[in-house]
Amino acid sequence: MSTLDKREEGFEKKFALDEEQKFRAEARRNRLLGLWAAEKLGISGEAATAYAKEVVAADFEEAGDADVLRKVMGDFAAKNVAITEQAIRARMSELIAVAAAEVKAGK
C-alpha cells in the first residue's frame, strides 16, 4: 500500500468518524431539546423522557432540522405555549454546542 493510499484511507476513516459524531450530536441535541420542550409543556418524569424520544424520532422524517422544529412548534401551539420559532432555533443552536461537546468527551 502506497503512502497516498494510506493517506486516502486515513481521510476516509476521519470522514466516517466525523459523520458519526455529527449524527450522534444531532440526536443528543434533539433529546435535550425534547427535555427542554417537555418542561415548557408541563411534562415531567417518564412522560418527559418519552416526549424527548418522540422529538428524536421526528428527525428521521426528512433531512435537516425542519421536521424537529415543526414537531416542537406544533406541540407548543397545541398547548398554547407562546414560544417563537426564533427562540426554538436559538435553543437548538445552544444545545448542538452542548451535545457536540458531550459526544467529543465520550459521554
Image (spheres, rainbow, N blue to C red):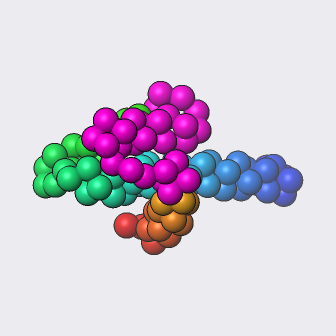
Tell me where residue 52 appears, x and y as whole percent: 30, 47
68 lies above or below 27:
above
Left or right of residue 41, residue 30 in this image? right
- Against 101, residue 45 (above or below) is above
Residue extent of the magenta highlight: 59-88
- Asked whether residue 68 appears in the rendered view, the answer is no
Which residue lies at the image location 28% right of the left edge and 41% below the top edge?
A: 79
**In the image, is residue 47 part of the stretch drawn in magenta?**
no
89 and 101: which one is in front?
89
In the rendered view, does 49 fall on the left or right side of 99? left
Place of residue 30 in the rendered image (x, y in percent of width and height, measured from the top left): 42, 49
- In this orientation, does residue 69 appear? yes
Residues 95 and 20: in front is 95
- Res. 29 image quadrant: bottom left
Image position of 12 (left or right of 74): right
Task: Count all numbered tags in the image, as a single digit.
Answer: 0
The residue under the point 33% across, 58% down is 36
Q: Where is residue 61 in the image (x, y as percent from the top left)?
A: 47, 27
Where the C terminus falls, by quadrant? bottom left
The residue under the point 55% across, 37% down is 66
At 26% across and 57% down in the image, what residue appears?
Answer: 39
Across and down, in percent, residue 76 comes to 35, 43
Name the residue at the top extreme: 61
The magenta stretch spans residue 70: yes
- Taking depth in this image into account, of 66 and 61 the one nearest to the observer is 66
